[in-house]
Image: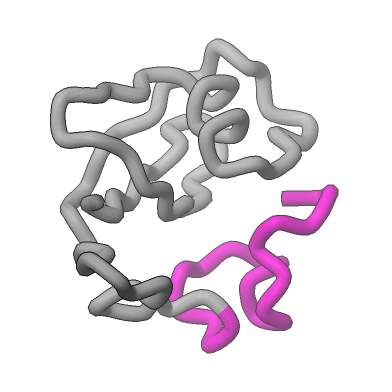
Amino acid sequence: MPIYEYRCEANGHLVEVRHGMNERLTTRGELCARAGISRGATAPGAAVVKLISAGFIGAGSSEPAVMSDCGSGGCGAPACAGGACAAEDF
């Protein structure tokens, strides 16, 4: 199953989620629900933009083929520097 990276237009946060190729997420509320994270203070109707597929989950594998930058501070979100991208303040 593909892994997609989305950017929230309202706050700039990057979030990775897995979903089918035909599924489209267009709002922060949809994205956070799919990712299983809190949307924080950002409005649920805030627009999100799909950036690029980050990798695939292969048959029989539970690990993404390509790991995200989370935990390395690579995504630019303040919470990410500690590896806590799903934190309440995200």
**What span is colored magenta in the figure?**
71-90
Question: Is 74 contained in the magenta span?
Answer: yes
Residue closest to the eye, 29 or 76? 29
Q: Residue 84's quadrant in the figure?
A: bottom right
Residue closest to the eye, 35 or 40? 35
Q: What secondary structure predominates along the stretch shown in magenta? A: loop
Which residue is depicted at the point 36% across and 19% down?
26
Instruction: Tell me if residue 83 comes above or below residue 6 in the rendering.
Output: below
Q: Which residue lies furthest to the right in this view?
A: 88
Which residue is depicted at the point 33% across and 74% down?
61
Task: Answer with left or right where residue 58 lies relative to residue 18.
Answer: left
Q: Which colour scheme is used?
A: one colour
Which residue is depicted at the point 28% across and 49% down?
4
Q: Residue furthest bottom?
A: 72
Residue 80 location, x and y as percent? 63, 72
Instruction: Tell me if residue 10 comes above or below residue 13 in the rendering.
Output: above
Which residue is depicted at the point 26% across and 78% down?
66
Instruction: Tell me if residue 30 comes above or below residue 64 in the rendering.
Output: above
